[in-house]
Image (cartoon, rainbow, N blue to C red):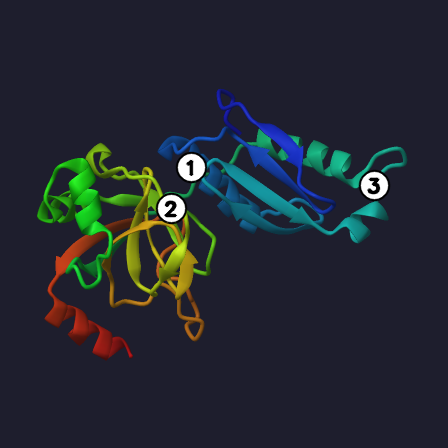
Amino acid sequence: MHPHLSYKIISLGDAALTIDFGNLINESINKKVITLFHNLQHKPIQGMVEAVPAYSSLTIYYDVISLYKNIPDGKTVFEWMKDQTEKYLKEKIETENKEEVTVIIPVCYDKEFASDIDSIAAKKNISPEEIVQIHTSRSYRVYMLGFLPGFAYMGEVDDIIIIPRKPTPQNVIAGSVGIAGQQTGVYPLNSPGGWQIVGRTPVKMFDKEKKEPTLVKAGDHVRFISISKDEFENIKGRNS
């Protein structure tokens, strides 16, 4: 697949394996993970049930019972799947020539919706307005979805506003936009969470009634734009 990209294949329970390309937040590695994921959707390995991409790894879930009937004697299902996965990685992986999708997400950064913006500003010795300007000044790559349906892990934020997650999770309202380390993200549902909240969006990140329930997918890019509270209420009203 990628002769200069090292990896290891490790067992994940009884019915899955993970291809680990390193514990990194790296756009180049993530692009290769997403490419491999799309290839597996079109040409799955025998016995594969599902593939799940992450920042720098990809997990393959497989049907143990059906594979057990067909693998050679003396091999475990994991050993056989590991061999098949390594063969797959040595094949030429087709790169999709798709335009990268950029999703615009409006965010109200008013303090009513930004419970942690003042504390971040104090710790960083900058103003809340500067945090908004910095947060909206760049495009963020969606590295993976997880934690909650439609929760997109995005990065990387500017070094100036990198902030650790909270030591204790708190209740977070759906649509809240947070920062944790180098990452930024939007809570799609009401949930306990430890990210530092800097705003809220009126758009739904997850809607189970839609054919495509998640607003963004791994590999997309996101730009946040600042809106007023009145604009927030208007958009929220239209989406209700």
From this viewpoint, is residue 82 visible?
yes
Q: Which residue is mark 3?
A: 71
Q: Judging from the image, what secondary structure is the residue with disc 1 in? A: helix
Q: Indicate whether 173 appears above or below 223.
A: below
Residue 116 rendering spot, x and y as whole percentages: 24, 52
Real-space Cα separation, disc 1 to disc 3, in angstroms: 32 Å
Residue 90 place in picture, x, y as percent: 59, 28
Image coordinates of residue 69 in percent, x first then y, are 86, 48
Q: Quadrant of residue 205?
A: bottom left
* Tag 2 residue: 219
Task: From the image, tell me which residue sits under label 1.
Answer: 30
Q: Give the quadrant of residue 70.
A: top right
- Answer with mark 2 or mark 3, whichever residue precedes in sequence: 3
> Label 1 is placed on what type of residue?
Asn
Tag 3's secondary structure?
Answer: loop
In the foreground, 43 or 132: 132
**Which label number is shown at residue 138?**
none
For the residues labelled 1 and 2, say whether their Cβ atoms are less than 8 Å apart. yes
| Amino acid, disc 3 | Ile
- Of the two numbered discs 1 and 2 on the same chain, state the one appearing first in sequence: 1
